[in-house]
Amino acid sequence: MTLTLEGVAKRVGAEQHLHPLSLELQPGSFNVLLGRTLAGKTTLMRLMAGLDAPTAGRVLENGKDVTGKSVRHRDVAMVYQQFINYPAMTVYDNIASPLRRQGKDKAEIDAKVRRTAAMLRIEPYLDRLPAELSGGQQQRCAIARALVKGAGLLLLDEPLVNLDYKLREELRAELRDIFADGKTTVVYATTEPQEALILGGNVTVLHEGRMLQTGATGDVFHTPASLECAQVFSDPPMNVVDAILTNDRVALSDGTSLPLSAHDRNLPAGPCKVGIRANHLTVLRRSERLVPVKGKVALSEISGSETFVHLRHGDTTLVAREEGVHSHPIGSDIQVYADPDRIFVFSTAGQLVAAPNWRRGALRNIA
Amino acid sequence: MDKVQDNRAWFLIIPVFLIVAFSAVVPLMTVVNYSVQEIFGPGQTFFVGTEWFEAVLKDDRLHDALVRQIIYSLAVLLIEIPLGILIALGMPGGRSAKTSLTLVLLALPLLIPFNVVGTIWQIFGRGDIGLLGATFRAIGIDYNYTNNSAHAWITVLVMDVWHWTSLVALLCYAGLQSIPPAFYQAAKIDGASKWAVFRYIQLPKMRGVLIIAVLLRFMDSFMIYTEPFVLTGGGPGNSTTFLSQYLTQMAVGQFDIGKAAAFSIVYFLIVLLFSFIFYTIITRTGEGEKK
């Protein structure tokens, strides 16, 4: 279905949980809501589902106003952070329950339940109770229950957050294919930029109850409209340094001076802010173009098979990415290299002025 | 691994042995001892074998008391369990003044001693000075628990419901509070009816506390003594003479120590048997749900 939000807002008491925002979701699209905790993702989802009514604005389904309509009469399905299944029903009955409510005949229910269960690889457990399954299987059951309903709008509220790392990776990889049926409009909330990039589709970035930006995931990642948006959509957060632009160089407040590249040439001279993602600040000097930045190690953390080195340089703290697992003694001197082709330039107010060039369709390579 | 022999270990076990011995084994064995003897006085005892048990099993008054007791306990369960669930479902959730007030009000009856409850209702129900009795009289019902068996019976039952439904409600409330709100939202999105929410989410989630509630209320009501004792002393006639009453009459009233001891053992076994049956049935139904 086409879901249109027109200036919807949610206020609880004196607190504005969600500032007015407008959004249109196309039929069959995959939409990621990206934001940290308390950004308003769940609030927005509840409004989309009809669990709550917005305090302002309108919600339209296929052009029809459904703002005050109870969730019971809407065409939605939802998957939660917690694994929600009927505790006293078997996996089979759980998955069959929405179909039974729709009054489908037995053979059709059976076929649909088995097909969905096979898709989510829980077919061997159809006779078990949810409590007898592992967390990953319970969530698969909940997803199957939501899918089988065939609702026009499917909401997933951080469905993978309570799973362990391995299961999360596994299920995440499958989800894209599962939702690729092309009819259901899917909304998927997450706190992790990585997840948004892997899932692709469109992304809507939320921060403290405001919508910062919306668009194709690649566009938003490569051209974040503001510093705030770039921070939310980078993990670790983007390095930000005050800087001064001149006609051929940009001088960072810590003394480093970077040559201008194709994308940030011809900008008006003056103060600005420069953003560099951790993966463009590397310990290894891969090319002569890269500009060295000296500092002292403040912390070095290992994530997966990468190392993130936090270094202090003057009064700024930067995060650099290093391929492989390394250890750097705290306080030791280190030199990292910034890629002048990959820097973002923001105005002093935090609006994007120039972003590095990128090829559309190159998204998968970066993720 | 070599076994270490150390007789000092006995010192660690002795306290438990002593406590269990004096709290359970010695009193129980004393009763067993009495139940096979005819006792005329201190030092004048004769071994009679199973005679007391035979007498107890053939005692008609005891059969009547047992039947009365079973009907009473079933009535208690049939009223208090559904009523308790209903109250729990209707209670306000969250942390508000309303919730606190409801909890305190519900807990109040539980704080009142048994004999006080009996006295309260005895006075409450009196036709001359009691509010309830006087009200019944005023609207033309000749309510009198001292000479009408049905009235006495119902009064004892209402008393129990008033005293103990709170316990069931509080237990169920605790069970309901442990259900994450996402379950209700999910049910709403599924379009589930109120009944379906109760049957497929709330009831299964309350199963654990309900087992405890049923067992507690059954065992307790099966041993009821104080309330009918205070109200009418088991009357009128024998209408509110339940097993405990009859046992006391036998042991203290008629000083039939041997027979009372045999009765005690049979009584104990009956409570044990019923509890076991209830427990098995309830846990089995749960398992049936799994298949």
Image (tube, coloured by chain):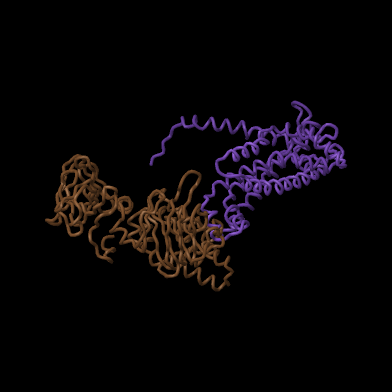
Q: Residue furthest left?
A: A288
- The brown one among the chains is A
Of residues B67 and B213, the one drawn nearer to the viewer in this rendering: B213
Q: What residue lies at 78% left-to-right and 37% top-to-bottom?
A: B246
Of residues A19 and B20, the one drawn nearer to the viewer in this rendering: A19
Residue A35, image x and y in percent?
Answer: 38, 52
Which picture quadrant has residue A329? top left
Q: Residue furthest front?
A: A268
Q: Residue furthest top?
A: B42
Looking at the image, residue A133 lies above or below residue B225 = below
**In the image, is B224 to the left or to the right of A350?**
right
Q: What residue lies at 35% left-to-right and 57% top-to-bottom?
A: A195
Q: Residue furthest bottom?
A: A107
Looking at the image, residue A201 lies above or below residue A290 = below
Residue A96, image x and y in percent?
Answer: 54, 65
Quarter of the C terminus of chain A within the rendering: bottom left
**In the image, is A264 to the left or to the right of A130?**
left
Residue A287, image x and y in percent?
Answer: 13, 57
**In the image, is A277 to the left or to the right of A173?**
left
- The purple one among the chains is B
Q: What residue lies at 66% left-to-right and 48% top-to-bottom?
A: B86
Which picture quadrant has residue B15? top right
Q: Is residue B285 visible?
A: yes
Looking at the rendered structure, the number of numbered marks drawn on it comes to 0
Q: Is residue B233 visible?
A: no
Residue A60, image x and y in percent?
Answer: 49, 62
Looking at the image, residue A184 lies above or below residue B209 = below
**In the image, is A244 to the left or to the right of B141?**
left
